[in-house]
Each structure stands twice: as structure tokens, then as C-alpha cells.
Image (tube, grey):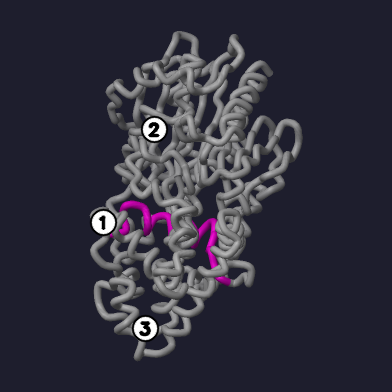
Amino acid sequence: MARRRAGGLLRGVTLLVLLSVSVGAEFKGFRRFHEAQEVARRSVTEEQWFTQRLDHFNGADRRVWKQRYFVNKAFYKPGGPVFLMIGGEGPANPAWMRDGAWLTYAQKLGALCLMLEHRFYGESHPTANLSTDNLRYLSSRQALADLAHFRSVTAERLGLADRKWVAFGGSYPGSLAAWFRLKYPHLVHAAVATSAPVRAAVNFPEYLEVVWRSLASEDADCPVLVKKASWTLAERLKDPKTYDNITKDFNLCSKLQVQTEMDSAYFLETLAGNFMDVVQYNEDNRGFEGATGTNITIKVLCGVMADTSLGDPYARYAAVARLMMDTFSIKCLNASYEGYRRDMADASWSGPAAGGGRQWVYQTCTEFGFYQSTDSPNQPFTGFPLVYHVTQCADFYNVSGEQLAEAVAQTNELYGAYDIRSTRIVLPNGSIDPWHALGVTTDISPDLPAVFIQGTAHCANMYPARTEDLPQLALARDHIFLLLQRWLKQ
């Protein structure tokens, strides 16, 4: 549900729930609704298009565009609630219209299910291309206004104006869910903001600190071995005589070239990403989305790092890289920062970064930061400090470090960071997920409760239930539902 590269959150999804009056029977758990969910899986989900405003904050700008959304009526009962899932920083995945914990809620509550794609992602193209000039219309503030306009028009058109809306979101859209309730309380009755990084931060070294702790939770030696390997590689990058061997060890597409610190940092971050991504989604039930590599877990990576038959920690680190490449059918690794820069500079909708990379990094440079740097000593990697991330903002969008810092300060001023002044927002997070370091993990007030789920990763409570789920994960899903039951009676 979240994009990690360049400080981002990626595969984010927001759920928005419009709920009617109070529900009746007490919630009895998730797995008993498996048969009913099969109905949803068999349902045909059709994409539709909503006429959306380009700029919600300029009344003189009358330009509009078509925003994609999906509808599933499988569980709807007259007078029942309406759930709206809002796509995050990637294409809206129709798989969420067929599965996921939110459909269990929908079956129980007789809900109509809608999913709205985020502007500038997927097929929702507000502008002719992704030029920096056009990307000024991409922001969380515009996205929230999209939600408000879509909610108002759809509610009026479908006769749902008297329903109670509850916003659900995971990852960046989890933040949107909380902020939708915060900024549009007349439209949203409550919110479930899962794995939501509600505080923007230019530098986010805590991400890698959580990676250390999450690896150590499997094997105390694991992050130590990763650190030895990462530092060994960083030292070898200083000697051009090692480049042929490094090229072979990591199966690079072309001979390693390290001409600037950006080249070195990009290579080191790419390899660290093998561990960062696995930790972030560790054991999440993402297979229904079509995700690959879900069998690669912290346990698997730490097993490789502990395997002395592979050689020293550096050799085991290279074995992890080859394992990940085999898993994702990658023939060779592109370690060129210049190649990455060219991809990110392509502003066409058919460009290599148009799937979400160019857009999301723009949002990090103009709103959030979230840069997962190696600036903390309490983490396992080296070589990609804050300046590496900040330089990308200048390289890709001509955004300076000073402009970035001011933008992040404005975001926290706009939304309040941890100081959320609202009601009826529940904030679930997983202890393994590095993003919980920017989220709320303890209750703010009785009406702003946190649900901190030990041993789970990013957005775990949103995925479909399964028999091997940890007991505390099943309890968290039940607890969230009971909160909604209570709030909907208010």
C-alpha cells in the first residue's frame, strides 16, 4: 500500500466509508463472511468516470478532467452504508473491489462500495503530461477537495446525502482519511486511518531504525550482519579496482561507474531497498492484489544473512540481491543514477516513471519529505544521507532544500502533525512497519484512539483475513469495527 523509493509511500489505498444509521447485530469476526465475499469476487467491477475540477482553489479556473472510479453493488441493501475507497500514489487496483477487510465490513453493513482513483495516478490524468508546471495541481490539498466534491455530487446524484461517511485509508491515503475528517467534518462522520504518517518530516532516519529493530526481532545478529555487509560494500566503492567484481557479484546491467556521490548513494540505496521493502510488507496478505514476492519475509532474508556457506556477510548481501532479482524476474540490476534521473525527467504519460514514481517524488519534494536517510547511527545501512534525497528534488523539479523545508513546515501547519484536533478517528499501526514512526501509536483521546498491532507490518489490518493471522491482528480488525458501530450511533 505504500511507495518506499525516494522517501515515499507507494501502493497506497484509501477507503472511505459512508455509513448510514446504527447497525444491529454485534460483530462476530471476519472469517465467517468468506462465502459472502465470494459473491463480491464474482461481481463484475466496471470503471466509470467522474467530471472533476482541475483547481479547486481558483474559482476563475473552469477546467475539468475525468477521474476514474469503480462501483460494486454486491452487498448493498437499501438504506445501507456506502464505502468509498480512494486510490493512493499508484493506479487504483480493482482487486480491492473483490477482496479485503473493508468488504467484510460492507457485507455486514449492507454497503455500496465505490473506489476513487487519486489525481495524477493510474488512468486519472488531469493534464496533458507530467511537466513540473502541470504537477502544481498535484497535492494532498487538491486530493482532499477531490474527495469532497466527489462525495457531494455522488451523494446528491444517488440520494445518499443523509448518510454518515467514514473515511478509511492505508498509508498516504490513511493520512488523507484522517485529514478528510479533520478538514471536512460536515462531510465525514468518522475515519479509519491505517498506517498513516500524519507528521511530515524532511529527514526520516527513524524508518531505518525500525528496520534494524524489525530484523533484530527475527534474529539479533541479522541487522549486525547487514550493517557489516553494507559498510564493506561502501568501502569497496571507493576503489575502482573492485568494480568488475561488484558488477559480477550483484549482476549489474553494465560495468559499475561511480563518478559522483549520487552514483554511490543510488547503488547503496537500491540494495538496501531489498531489506526495506520486505520489512515494510512483512507477511502482509497481499497476494490478492497480484503482488509477487510475498513469500520473501524477514525470516527468509535473515536466513540468507546467517548462511555461512555463502561466504562472508558481503557475499550473503549479494545473495539477497540475486534472490530478489530472481523473485521479481529482473535479468540484471541497473545501478546508474544518471539513468534514474533520465527516467524521472520524462514528463510523458508513457514515460518509465509515469506509473507513480515521478508524481510521488514530486509530492515528497513539495509536501512531505519522508526521506529515509542513513543519518542515524542506529540503523544497518550507510551511504545515502539526507543530501542525496534533497538533491533529487533539485535535479527533477528544481526545488531547493530551503523550499522543501518550508513546504514540509506548511504541511504540518495545515494538518497539525501529531496534534490532531478532531473526533472519531481511529489510527491503526503495525510494530514491524517502519512508517509507524511518523504515525500515532498511543491514544490521543477517547475519540482519537490508536490501535498498535504488535508483530504486523504496513496496513496489515486492511488485507483479507486468513487462518495464519496473528491473534492480535484479528482482534484489531474486530476492535475497529466495534468502534465504528459505536460512533455510528452518535
- Image disc number at residue 96: 2
Q: Which residue is mark 3?
A: 258
**Callout 2: few (<14), some (14-19), or many (20+) C-alpha neighbours within 10 Å?**
many
Q: Earlier in the sequence, mark 3 or mark 2?
A: 2
Say if residue 318 shows up in the picture.
yes
In the displayed structure, 279 sits above or below 17; it is below
Dot 3 falls on a residue whose secondary structure is: loop
The residue labelled by disc 1 is 329
Identify the magenta region: 352-374
Label total for image = 3
Front residue (pair 124, 153): 124
Asked whether, in this view, residue 452 is left or right of residue 165, the answer is right
Query: How many neighbours does mark 1 have within 10 angstroms: few (below 14), some (14-19), or many (20 or more)?
Result: few
Q: Residue drawn at (65%, 37%), measured in percent from left and top?
A: 451
| Sooner in the amino-acid sequence: mark 1 or mark 2 | 2
| Quarter placement of the N terminus | top left
For image coordinates 73% across by 39% down, the residue present is 443
The answer for how far apart the CA atoms under marks 3 and 1 are is: 26 Å
- Image quadrant occupied by the C terminus: top right
Nearest to viewer (mark 3 / mark 1): 1
CA distance separating discs 1 and 2: 25 Å
Amino acid of disc 1: Ser
Q: CA distance from mark 3 to mark 2?
A: 42 Å
